[in-house]
Amino acid sequence: MHDFKNLKVWQKAMDIAQATYELCAQFPDAERYGLISQMRRAAISIPSNIAEGAGRNSNGEFRQFLGIAVGSAYELETQFLLAGRLLYLNEAEVEPITAQLVELQKMLYGLKNSLRP
């Protein structure tokens, strides 16, 4: 069992989730149940799966949840790229958050690989 709140990867995922909420606030109201909902769920999924995995009984289970978190990070990156294409966000907003997501993906892979049996 790991203390998830002390994991830098969880802290970064929480920062990204918060930024996602803040950035989605400027989207059109018509996206409330579309892209905004999808992005928020993906953003919340990342730190939630890190936390859930950290609370499991084995490194194998933790690795499985980290894999889900990686998938959600890629999903959220794709959604930010789409938000840029739809002009809901400008390049100056999309680039930093996608760069953070790429860094988070690498951190997740690193942690996952460190838990190998």
Image (cartoon, rainbow, N blue to C red):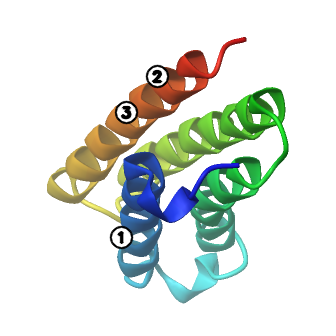
Q: Residues within 10 Å of mark 1 (few under 14, many from 20)?
A: some
Q: Residue 103, image x and y in percent?
A: 33, 34
Secondary element type, mark 2: helix
The numbered mark, 3 or 2, whose residue comes first in the sequence reads: 3
Q: Which label is found at residue 102?
A: 3
Q: Residue 82, image x and y in percent?
A: 48, 47
CA gap, disc 3 to disc 2?
12 Å
Q: Residue 63, image x and y in percent?
A: 72, 30
Secondary element type, mark 1: helix
Please give the name of the residue rendered at 37% of the width and 50% of the height, measured from the top-left corner: 8
Quadrant where the C terminus lies?
A: top right
Task: Please give the residue where the numbered disc 1 appears in the rendered image.
Answer: 19
Q: Using residue 41 as the reference point, say whether residue 89 is left or right of it.
A: left
Q: Is residue 102 above or below residue 38?
A: above
Residue closer to the observer: 98 or 110? 110
Q: Kindly report which numbered mark, 3 or 2, lies closer to the viewer in this rendering.
A: 2
Q: Amino acid at mark 2?
A: Gly
Secondary element type, mark 3: helix
Please give the name of the residue rendered at 62% of the width and 22% of the height, measured from the top-left corner: 115
Q: Residues within 10 Å of mark 3 (few under 14, many from 20)?
A: some
Please give the name of the residue rendered at 60% of the width and 53% of the height, measured from the top-left corner: 46
CA gap, disc 2 to disc 1?
23 Å
Q: Kindly report which numbered mark, 2 or 1, lies closer to the viewer in this rendering.
A: 2
Q: Using residue 91 as the reference point, say whether residue 63 is left or right of it.
A: right
Q: Amino acid at mark 3?
A: Val
Q: Residue 68, image x and y in percent?
A: 73, 39
Q: Which label is found at residue 110?
A: 2
Q: Is residue 39 above or below residue 27?
A: above
The numbered mark, 2 or 1, whose residue comes first in the sequence reads: 1
